[in-house]
Image: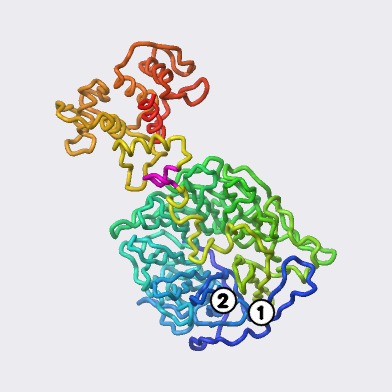
Amino acid sequence: MSRRFLVILVSFALGTVVVTASPVQGATSECEGSTSMYCEEWIFHLDGWNRSSSPVIADIDADGLNEIVFGHQDGKLRAYEADGTLKWESLAVPGVAPGCTSQTSASAIDSSPAVADLDNDGIPEVVVGVGSTWVSNQNGSVIAFNGKTGAMIWNFDRGRDEGNTWANTGTPDGYCGHVFATPAIGDIDGDGKLDVVFASWDFQIWAVDRFGEPLSGFPVNNDDSVWSSPALFDLDSDGDMEIFIGGDSTLGGYFDHQGGVFRALDWENGTVTELWHRTANEVFHASPAIGDINGDGRPEAIVSTGENWLSETGNASDHNKVFAFHLDDGSTVPGWPQSAGGTVKASPVLGDLDGDGRPEVIAGSWDRKVYAWHGDGSLYWSVAPEFVHGENVFTARITSSPIIADLDGDGDQDVAAGTDFGLAMMSGQNGSPLEAGVFWPNKVSHAWSHEAAPAIGILGGERRIVVTGFDTPNHRTRVASFSLPSTSATDAWPMARWSPTRTGSLHKSLCELSGASGTFCDVSDSAYYAAGVHWMVENEITTGISSRLYGPNLVLTRAQMVTFLWRQEGSPLGYSAHGFGDVSAGSYYNGAVAWAKAEGITTGTGEFTFAPDASVTRAQLVTLLWRRSGGELYQPPHGFIDVPNDRYYSVAVAWAKAEGVTTGTGEFTFSPSDNVTRAQAAAMLYREAVS
């Protein structure tokens, strides 16, 4: 097992679940006379720790007003009104699977709550994971509560005992695996109803329906513990959301890799398929953020790692890395990964800091710096926030996932990040402090530790930031609410995992991201190939790779190419058998291949082979188009230095340049050996047709 756990034994005396609306004891308001732009609306303290349960701001009782919810290691999930009064508190009593130790008391909460109306009854549910490395001898689970009353609706009871959490061994300890990760809520099976996705230290990735029952195909084995929270995104715009999640991996396990694994999973007809996975030389404890960071219309998952193997014997060379993977195939985004000066365990977030319409990547590191990178991987800024106390100046590790919002009311996005010594409020343009010159008692948070991200939302009719911090030696938690300046801007990443549903994605689907008005969600109206794809659809030349996807970045195959040409000619039939043994009579391209051979457009790759799945090069494509046009033997100069006159395709390239079918890949280059993408094919076919 590659899990590393801190062993601190804390005992709690927990009673029964009680729903109450009594005021919060000790809450205060302190606004007048403050020198800060952030007015403290109220503050209170709790005994014990909330270390990492990030608050959610959402309307949990359907009254049109937002409330605040977070967990605590005392096993209570608490909901507060906007003015800081307690709405309800409920004990998080886990469901217990057979084989795990019976438990009727609550389990500690390190997970962050998610909010959505699961059963569509008009009242949202609050869903949270339970279990902690800091509190021993408790079961893990996921629990759903009624947002209005705090009453438990269901608790998940299918967990597994895969080892000793507190001794860090593979010997079962009698307790079901804990759920540190934050659940994400979305429609996984396409039935129009919300599901809950989470992962556990029992090595499993789960998706359950609105009643807490596992969806068919789940759980999915992850090889080792999972700390990472899932991100959800409908990649193929088919109505169900794909799952993107990191985890631990161990030699001899499912992946037989020491480090971490990041995966893309898709549910289809009761079966879960792994679309792709990537590995790293460190565990993926952080959670992914999804967005289009470079503006190419192709969404990416951005994720950092952790510090398990850094603390153990092993290769931890990726502990300081931030990765960016294309969602469609898992390939690395150009310019990534990027490295910080220390471990990057807290999850990265996305937001447009420089106003260019594309989100930057923001992450904090244990080297005490917050980093902001552009989508191409270039560094925008990196700053170590300073905390001034008298004559002393402190810096501290960045320990919480940041949030991105307009913190000073100027219409631009700024950054707030938790550290070991307070909350850093930073300008998004350069990382400079927004609380410079403010006396330390008046700051949003000073001399408190933060692993939970703050949350921003409308509370009491105004913008507020809610902050939770903990004091390690005194074993206390501070909860505070501050007003923020008004703004016309939309906050880019206002809370942990972006929204109350905790999906970790700036958009729900590819269609929403692209804003495409045509048939295919992955063909934006501004793309160079958009006119070509629209023309192909209108002329029934393509139906895409699915009902809503064209697949512009996929490499064109020989089968697809001859089918495009054949359909452009009206899909003629009646040709003699082609004689290629690798083209079955029932294939969609059989008629196209017969036509192409009879018309002299292709002779195959051998006497009896066509190689339908082989990729098409740029040289091959223009040659096919030239032959179909009649193969006129003229040769005006094409001007491409990489196309010698003695090559089979040289005349075809000259024809394509003269007819406006191609302009090359550069002023003097054609790149004949490069594979053709479906986007390039659409553009070339369209140019030839209208030239």
Against 349, residue 598 (above or below) is: above
Numbered tag placed on residue 72 in the rendering: 2
Based on the picture, tell me whether residue 398 belongs to the magenta stretch.
no
Estimate the x, y position of residue 175 in percent, counting from the top left. Answer: 43, 75
How many numbered marks does the figure carry? 2
Estimate the x, y position of residue 69 in percent, counting from the top left. Answer: 55, 74
Against 580, residue 235 (above or below) is: below
Helix, strand or loop status at disc 1:
strand
Which residue is nearer to you in this view: 541 or 54? 541
Q: For the residue marked with disc 1, what is the amino acid?
A: His
How packed mark 1 is, by other alpha carbons closer than 10 Å (few <14, some 14-19, many 20 or more), is some
Quadrant into which the C terminus falls: top left
Estimate the x, y position of residue 667 in percent, counting from the top left. Answer: 52, 22
The residue lying at 42 percent from left, 57 percent from top is: 243
The residue lying at 56 percent from left, 75 percent from top is: 67
Which residue is nearer to you in this view: 598 or 131? 598
Using the rendered view, name the quadrant where residue 523 is placed. Answer: top left
Q: For the residue marked with disc 2, what is the amino acid?
A: His
Q: Is residue 351 left or right of residue 592?
A: right
**Which residue is label 1 attached to?**
45
Chief secondary structure of the magenta portion: loop
Cα–Cα gap, marks 2 and 1: 12 Å
Against 682, residue 352 (above or below) is: below
Q: Is residue 110 visible?
A: yes
Where are the magenta residues, as a range?
A: 516-524
How packed mark 2 is, by other alpha carbons closer than 10 Å (few <14, some 14-19, many 20 or more), is many
